[in-house]
Image: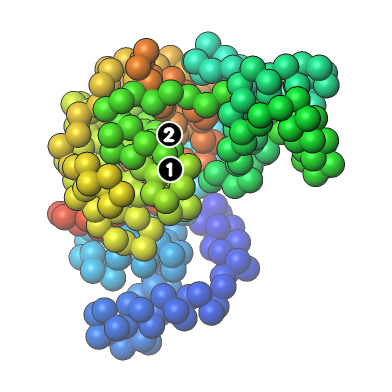
Amino acid sequence: MFVVKYLLQQVRSVNIQVMKERIAKIHLETKKPKCIILTDMLWCAVRYGAGYRDYDLFELYDVPHHLRKTYITRGRNSELVKKYCDVHYLHFFQNKNEFNNVFAAYLKRDWIDLQAATYTECLQFMQKQKTFFCKPIDTCCGKGIEKVTVQTESDCEQLYAHLQQTGLQYILEEPLRQHPAVSQIYPDSINTVRIVTIVKNKIPHVICSYFRIGHNGFVDNFNHNGMVTPVDVETGIIKYPAMDKSKNVFLVHPQTGTPIKGFHFPDWEAAQKLCLRAAMEIPQMGYIGWDVCFTPSGPCLVEGNEFPGYDLYQLPVHTPNKVGLWPIFQI
């Protein structure tokens, strides 16, 4: 029943023009007839819950049929969320102010809820920080986040008035200071590691981890010009080049020239322990992707994702053997 509901939802959300563009691109790359590509794409949707975006991004057209079942697709990711997460606790991860309240001990930064705080408290926060992030409380994928610098009290007053007029709810957050070793790769964003945990039988497990790196901006999000590469769970070492969503591959960061492959994260064991502890704060949400910042004083949480971005998983350059991650999620 879940698969049927998922497929119906996907049919209603299909962008025919984008799907045609994906088919045309795959046709140029593989020389396969478009009708064959479409038929195979539809089969993957029915059999594995893979939309046309999954089919293109993971290059399922180039994956042997017997290995396609090893891939985590959008449909299968939804199955994991449904299996491990209680919808009654979603709000703790969907609203940044609630998340920050619950996980305050894991944050290592000052923040303030614009709606809950007084006018004076907000102005004092702005004047103290000077530079900070404005984050809508209920957005994801870095949408709506702005990095703001104020110089004078008048700047603070004008910003406060502007944010109130938008009709949105915001939190203001102190910028984190990134570990110098991580900043060498790219200093203009906080480059986080997405550490994915599953809680099963009241025991938390680290399943996989991915380094998200900024590029031409102040966010590291894969959907906003960022790039990603897996981090070896056991060692904290990067063993593959990074890739962006346009499938460009990077051995070194294009803006700094710093090598990506071979990087070894500081405090890796502490980062894993941090996420394992955090996973037990709300164990009813048993499948979470934690975004971890590495600071000079140790790792801290940036946020937790209640629908972990499966599009970070199994990118072609990271799966030379064409085997996906589904097996390692079967704990």
The answer to whether marks 2 and 1 mark residues whose Cβ atoms lie closer than 8 Å is: yes
Q: Amino acid at mark 1?
A: Asp
Label 2 environment density (alpha carbons within 10 Å; few <14, some 14–19, many ≥20): many
* Residue 115 visible in the picture: yes
Q: Which residue is mark 1?
A: 220
Mark 1, residues whose alpha carbon is within 10 Å: few (<14), some, or many (≥20)? many
Residue 318 visible (yes or no):
no
Residue lying at 50% horizontally and 15% vertically, measured from the top left = 108
Q: Position of residue 9 (x, y in %)?
A: 60, 61
In the drawing, does residue 61 fall left or right of residue 276? left
Name the secondary structure under disc 2. Answer: loop
Quarter residue 62 falls in: bottom left
Colouring of the image: rainbow
Q: Which percent across, then down, holds residue 181?
A: 27, 27
Indicate the position of residue 64 as horizontal and vertical percent values. Answer: 20, 65
In the depicted view, which residue is nearer to us: 44 or 208? Answer: 208
**Residue tagged by mark 2?**
190
Which x, y percent locates residue 283?
52, 21
Classify 49 as above or below 33.
Answer: above
Disc 2 residue type (three-letter): Ile
Q: Residue at x 55, y 57 (%)?
A: 6
Secondary structure under the numbered disc 1 in the rendered image: loop
Q: Is residue 40 left or right of residue 138?
A: left
* Mark sitting earlier along the chain (2/1): 2
Where's the N terminus, which quadrant? bottom right
On screen, 315 above or below 287? below
The residue sitting at 51% across, 56% down in the picture is 3
Position of residue 243 relative to residue 63, above or below, is above
Residue nearer the viewer, 278 or 250: 250
**Foreground pick, 10 / 223:** 223
